[in-house]
Image (tube, rainbow, N blue to C red):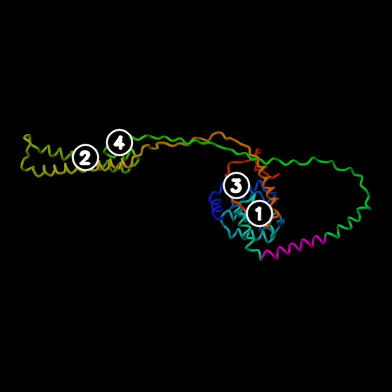
Amino acid sequence: MQPLRSAMTRTSPLAAGLVAAWLSIGPAMAELPKPARDAFDYGDFAQAERLLEALLASETLDPETRHEALQRLGLARYFQDRTSPAEEAFLELLRHDPDHQLDAFYFPPAAVAFFDGVRERHAADLAPIRERLRAARGTDADANAPDEQPQQAEQPTSKPTTDPAPPMLPPAVPAPLQVVERTYIRTLERTTERSVPVLALMPFGLGQFQNGNRPLGALSGSLQAVAAVTSVAAFLVVEALRQPSGRFQPEVVPVAGAADAVKWWSAGAFYLLWGASAVEAAVHYVPERRVDERLSEESEPNDRIIDLAPARDAARSVDDTTSTSTTSTSTTSTSTYTDRTTPDGDAPQEP
């Protein structure tokens, strides 16, 4: 149960769409104030909780509205992973109606299981309340029974009425339960460049730049350039000190020797850096590089009408078949929510 509840909390827009879609096709409920109902149906569970708590603080609520407000308050807290406050709201609801059930067809199975767990944990506290309510219902039925007997006895002596019978109206035809699934298409365009293998063997970090490793390419190229320039400069110094005869003056021999050593050492460093750069570029060779990536505009919407009446009727038939069983089993299903509205633009309503 925990993974499903966490997923609904992390993806609040999706969760709001799913809960709104389920509740919109659910059974008729007591009328709540529109701001509280809209906040819950659109997934703003924190705002719905605040509005419902303020509503329940009023002492003028009728029992049906208070019953529905407690149910939605518990669900709003549950979908925010606030299980302790959710249990308090559900327990208050069960104190008014210990036999209340959350329908697994209209509510997420994890929420139904949590609600049933609250009932089981507080079964000892709810049992006296259940017995008291049943006794009160029996007393009311006995009190109303004598009032019906005089009315039945007076019926034979009452004068026949001469008023015409009311006209027969055609049976109401339930509105079709349909939603519109709207699909948009967006295209991702990517531009790539193919790499040239021979560039991996080139000096001055060309292989690293081609592979997309710009920092390493800049470092390798800079070090090779410094080594190459130093070697060339030392070579020019040696040649400038050399006499036409190919020999050096005695006083410049130390300078020429030092310049000649710098020339060879810097040349060796250049070739060593070049070799290391070429090996690294070959090992991490990238055949293709992504140059550009662009997401196209949304296409024209493609609407498809889906009839939910067969699924609703099938679910009702399953509920009727299993209503006499004392053991209920909840299964978890995964639904994908898209932009769905009725053909008239409203949320689908239960006929």
The Cα–Cα distance between marks 3 and 1, rounded to whole angstroms, is 16 Å
Q: Which one is earlier in the sequence, the residue at label 2 or at label 4?
A: 4
User: Could you tell whether 252 is left or right of 290 in the image?
Assistant: left
Three-letter amino acid code of the residue under disc 3: Leu
Label 2 or label 3, whichever comes before in sequence order: 3
In the image: residue 72, left or right of residue 259: right
The numbered mark, 3 or 4, whose residue comes first in the sequence reads 3
Left or right of 247 on screen, residue 324: right
Q: Identify the magenta region.
A: 125-143
Which corner quadrant holds the C terminus?
Answer: top right
**Residue 66: percent from the left, percent from the top?**
69, 56
Q: Nearer the viewer, residue 175 or 251?
A: 175
Residue 228: image tag: 2
Residue 90 in percent (x, y) is at: 64, 58
Which residue position is annotated with label 4? Answer: 199
- Magenta span main SS: helix
Q: Is residue 132 magenta?
A: yes
Q: Can you identify the residue that label 3 sits on?
A: 18
Dot 3 and dot 4 residues touching (CB under 8 Å): no
Q: Nearer the viewer, mark 1 or mark 2?
A: 1
Q: Which residue lies at the image location 73% right of the left edge and 64% below the top edge?
A: 132
Name the foreground residue: 89 vs 250: 89
For the residue labelled by badge 3, is the local secondary structure a helix, a strand or a loop? Answer: helix
**For mark 1, what is the residue?**
102
Question: What secondary structure is found at the residue carrying circle 1?
Answer: loop
